[in-house]
Image (cartoon, helix red, strand yellow):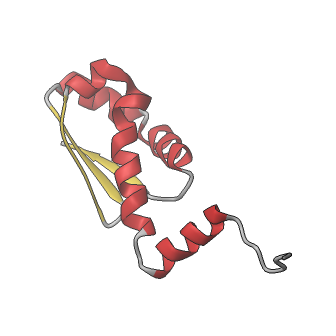
Amino acid sequence: MKRNNAEQIGNLVRHYLRQECLESPLNERRLISAWPELLGPTIAAYTNQLFIKNQVLYVHLTSAALRQELMMGRELLVRNLNKHVGAQVITNIVFR
């Protein structure tokens, strides 16, 4: 028996996630999980809290010097994090 309307499973899963409004929270979780991977274990050690609210990533850092350094490269960091996830998840980062 031949199937004419076969679809790839990945497309079906993406469609289901969009339909149930689960795609955005999943991408946010992926982005937060990617933080230590992209910035490395040293910077991740100075990071206490990460959360996303209204497409803004809030990062609590324990080092003022590191905070200043990351603020200088904020735009590149936003692009790299979004690129890693494969979607426009955040538009800005606030370092506290």
- Image quadrant in which the N terminus is located: bottom right
| Residue 71 higher or lower than 57, as above or below | above
| Residue 52 higher or lower than 39, as above or below | below
| Residue 7 higher or lower than 71, as above or below | below
Q: Please name whichever residue, 61 or 24, is drawn nearer the observer in this view of the structure.
A: 24
- Image quadrant in which the C terminus is located: top left
| Residue 89 higher or lower than 22, as above or below | above
The number of numbered badges drawn on the structure is 0
User: Which residue sits at x=63%, y=64%?
Assistant: 9
Left or right: where does residue 21 sit relative to residue 18?
left
User: Which residue sits at x=62%, y=62%?
Assistant: 10
Q: Please name whichever residue, 81 or 67, is drawn nearer the observer in this view of the structure.
A: 81
Q: Residue furthest front?
A: 1
User: Which residue sits at x=39%, y=53%?
Assistant: 92
> Where does the image place residue 70, in percent across and percent down from the top left?
34, 32
Asked whether residue 30 appears in the rendered view, the answer is: yes
Asked whether residue 90 appears in the rendered view, the answer is: no
> Where does the image place residue 23, in percent across and percent down from the top left?
45, 67
> Where does the image place residue 56, in percent across and percent down from the top left?
33, 57
Q: Please name whichever residue, 2 or 45, is drawn nearer the observer in this view of the structure.
A: 2
User: Which residue sits at x=40%, y=47%?
Assistant: 31
Q: Residue furthest top?
A: 42
Q: Quadrant of residue 72?
A: top left
Q: Quadrant of residue 7?
A: bottom right
> Where does the image place residue 34, in percent across and percent down from the top left?
40, 39
Q: Quadrant of residue 62?
A: top left
